[in-house]
Image (cartoon, helix red, strand yellow):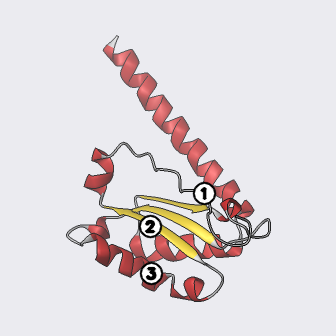
Amino acid sequence: MHKTRFLRKSIFRKNYSALHQENMNSRAMLNGPIENSIKRKLETVLKPLYCNIINESYMHNVPKGSETHFKVVIVSEKFNKQPLIERHRVINELLKVELQGGVHALSIVAKTPEQWETSDKTMTTSPACRGGFGK
């Protein structure tokens, strides 16, 4: 019984990993250039164990397909012994060009691997837009 359960978990992990990688590859083709740039910069410098870039522009009064509002969820060993404010500073510095360009808002969830493992790994949804002309 125990071996069967372990085998199922092992197979699930392998299948999930393959599906996740396939999904990430196909998603990269669907993402816009700003989202891809954000992901590339964060992955290159921070070598994250987990990185999810969420384009939340659709929740705001912007044209369809915009890349103006993002949430970054990132887990990196480079955050060990680094206060939260410093993690945010590092990410803001890495994304300086995007923030000076068309990115209007950036929500950051930056965790150490230990913090991530002890968390429930769910992210709260961002609140609906309350600003702009589309009130």
Crowding at mark 3 (Cα within 10 Å: few <14, some 14-19, many 20+):
some
Identify residue for label 3: 92
Q: Say if mark 2 contacts mark 1, CB within 8 Å.
A: no
Q: Is mark 2 on a helix, strand or loop?
A: strand
The one nearer the camera, 18 or 24, is 24
Residue 125 placement, left or right of 67: left
Closer to the chain start, of discs 2 and 1, is 2
Q: Is residue 71 above or below residue 114?
A: below
Q: Which of marks 2 and 1 is in front?
A: 1
x 55%, y 36%: residue: 15
Residue 16: percent from left, percent from top: 53, 38
Identify residue for label 1: 128
x 74%, y 61%: residue: 30
x 41%, y 23%: residue: 7
Closer to the chain start, of discs 3 and 2, is 3
Residue 81: percent from left, percent from top: 20, 70
Quarter of the image with the N terminus is top left
Measured in 3D between alpha carbons, the distance from the residue under mark 3 to the one under mark 2, in whole angstroms, is 9 Å
Which of the numbered marks, if any, corresponds to residue 94?
A: none
Q: In this view, does 88 lie above or below 3?
A: below
Which of the numbered marks, if any, corresponds to residue 108?
A: 2
Check disc 2 and give the amino acid type.
Ile
